[in-house]
Amino acid sequence: MEMAGESTGQEVYRLPAMSKQEMERLLQRCRICRMAFNDRPQPYIIPLDYVCLRGKMYFHFANYGIKVELFKKDPHVSVEVDRFNDDITEYESATLLGILVEVSDSAEKKMVSEALLESIGSRGGKRNVAARHGYKDLDIDTLSSKGSLVLRLDITDYVALRSP
C-alpha cells in the first residue's frame, strides 16, 4: 500500500492547457455552467444558463433565494464550464474565478436579456428555462424587471484544460 506523498515511480502527466482563444470558443459553444458560491461549511453549487457577449459572461437570477443571499454576502465565485464525449476521452474544461457584478445599466441589461432569450429560444426550452429562472413565462419585460438580476462575471483568473 502506498502512503500519501510516496512515489509510484510513474511520472505525473499534466493535461494540456487551453489557449485563451480555445477557452473563449468553449464558452461560446456551451450554454450551461456550474457556479460555486462561498458558503459554510461547504460551497453552494448550482447549474445556470449563461450567455457570452463582448468577451464577458452574463447570468440571470430571479431576485430571491439562496444564490442571491450568498451573492450579496460575498460576490466571489467560481464558474465551471465543460464539454466532453460519452467516454470522456475528449474533453475541455474551464474554471473561471471572479467577482459577480450586478448590471445596473439598462441598455446592457436589455442587451443581455435579449441574448439570453435568443439562446433559450434556439434550444426550444423557453418554458423549462422560465421555471428555472423563477417564472411561468420568460420575455424581455420579465428579464428586465426589478424582480430580476442580470449579473456579469468579472474574471480575475482561470484554469482551462483539455484532453491530450
Image (cartoon, rainbow, N blue to C red):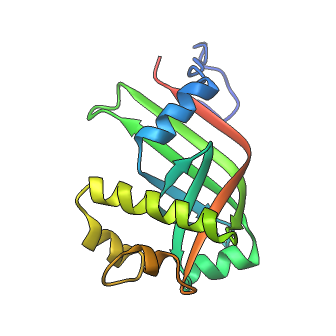
Residue 54 locus on image (x, y percent): 61, 44
- Residue at x 47% of width, y 75% of height: 143
Q: Is residue 153 above or below residue 104?
A: above
Residue 125 locus on image (x, y percent): 25, 63
- Residue at x 56% of width, y 39% of height: 94
In this rendering, the count of numbered labels is 0
Q: Is residue 97 above or below residue 82?
A: below
Q: Residue 117's quadrant in the figure?
A: bottom left
Residue 154 locus on image (x, y percent): 72, 53
- Name the foreground residue: 8 vs 86: 86
- Name the foreground residue: 90 vs 11: 90
- Residue at x 48% of width, y 56% of height: 50
Q: Residue furthest left?
A: 124
Q: Residue furthest front?
A: 107
Kindly tell me whether residue 1 is visible in this rendering: no
- Residue at x 26% of width, y 35% of height: 86
Locate the N terminus and report the quarter of the image it occupies.
top right
Residue 138 locus on image (x, y percent): 35, 76
Q: Is residue 25 above or below residue 149?
A: above
